[in-house]
């Protein structure tokens, strides 16, 4: 074999080796690119993605019956047109507190006068979401509640309120919820007590807690 033939064989082998090296690098880069997407969608990321896509529309039902305390204690009945739009009516026990003063305007006492009270309301909720807790996860929705109550008897008073509402389900209990409300209230008394006429607008705050059980 001549020198030229040996020299050409060496050059050919070197050229083949150099041309193959970039291909191996590209293959390595391609392999790492394929691995990364599968890794980024594992573990907690997959759990968060699943939680964000749930609408929790299977919680609750159409009709709910429960017990309400504060701002009237009684038995409200709720009807859910859908999870976001709810109307309510109920019979409660409520009353008014009357501040008594002497002829000089000095405070004497507070008199409480109670009777049955009729009430109605409407609540608009936002989308339900999962609230993760250490012990028990909750499904919640925040909204706005508008309601009115009317006190019967000798101390007729109309109450109008507007407040923030929050409905909470336990994640494992779909047929029972707890509703908390807090907001502003205006009382419109229309009665006479101890020869004094009570009327006008009396502003204040209201608080309401409601345990709701779905009948269907």
Image: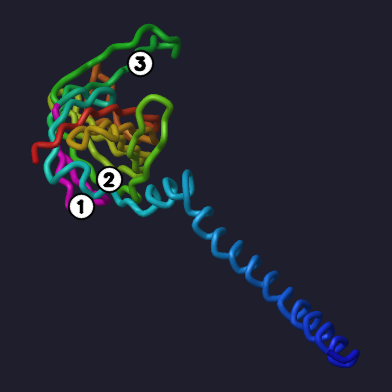
Check the image and report above or below for 152 versus 99.
Answer: below
Instruction: Quickly name the residue at label 2.
Output: 123
| Secondary element type, mark 3 | strand
Instruction: Quickly name the residue at label 1.
Output: 82
Residues 22 and 44: in front is: 22
Q: Which mark is residue 98?
A: none
**Magenta span covers which residues?**
75-89
| Secondary element type, mark 2 | strand
| Residue 169 shown left or right of residue 16 in the figure | left
Question: Label 1: how many residues lie within 10 Å, few (<14), some (14-19) or many (20+)?
Answer: few
Q: Nearer the viewer, mark 3 or mark 1?
A: 1
Image coordinates of residue 176 in percent, x first then y, are 20, 32
Q: Main secondary structure of the magenta part?
A: strand
Q: Earlier in the sequence, mark 1 or mark 2?
A: 1
Check the image and report above or below for 70 versus 177.
Answer: above
Check the image and report above or below for 57 versus 156.
Answer: below
Question: Label 3: how many residues lie within 10 Å, few (<14), some (14-19) or many (20+)?
Answer: few
Question: Label 2 near label 1: C-beta < 8 Å?
Answer: no
Image coordinates of residue 88 in percent, x first then y, are 17, 41
Quarter placement of the N terminus: bottom right
Per the image, is 203 magenta? no
Quarter placement of the C terminus: top left
Residue found 11% across the figure and 42% down from its top: 63
Per the image, is 88 magenta? yes
Instruction: Quickly name the residue at label 3.
Output: 99
Residue at far front of view: 1
**How far apart in space, not on screen, are marks 2 and 3 (Cα)?**
33 Å
Image coordinates of residue 113 in percent, x first then y, are 22, 16
């Amino acid at each position: 074999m001549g020198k030229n033939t040996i020299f050409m064989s060496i050059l050919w082998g070197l050229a083949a080796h150099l041309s193959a090296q970039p291909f191996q690098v590209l293959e390595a880069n391609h392999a790492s690119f394929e691995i990364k997407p599968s890794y980024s969608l594992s573990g907690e990321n997959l759990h968060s993605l699943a939680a964000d896509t749930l609408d929790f529309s299977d919680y609750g039902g159409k009709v709910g019956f429960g017990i309400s305390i504060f701002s009237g204690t009684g038995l409200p009945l709720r009807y859910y047109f859908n999870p976001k739009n709810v109307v309510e009516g109920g019979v409660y026990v409520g009353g008014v507190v009357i501040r008594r003063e002497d002829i000089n305007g000095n405070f004497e006492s507070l008199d409480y006068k109670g009777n049955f009270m009729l009430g109605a309301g409407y609540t608009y909720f936002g989308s339900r979401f999962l609230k993760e807790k250490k012990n028990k996860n909750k499904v919640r929705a925040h909204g706005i509640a508008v309601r009115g109550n009317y006190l019967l008897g000798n101390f007729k008073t109309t109450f109008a309120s507007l407040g923030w509402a929050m409905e909470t389900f336990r994640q494992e209990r779909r047929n029972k919820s707890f509703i908390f409300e807090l907001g502003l209230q205006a009382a419109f008394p229309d009665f006479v007590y101890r020869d004094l006429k009570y009327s006008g607008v009396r502003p204040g705050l209201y608080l309401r807690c409601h345990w709701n059980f779905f009948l269907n």
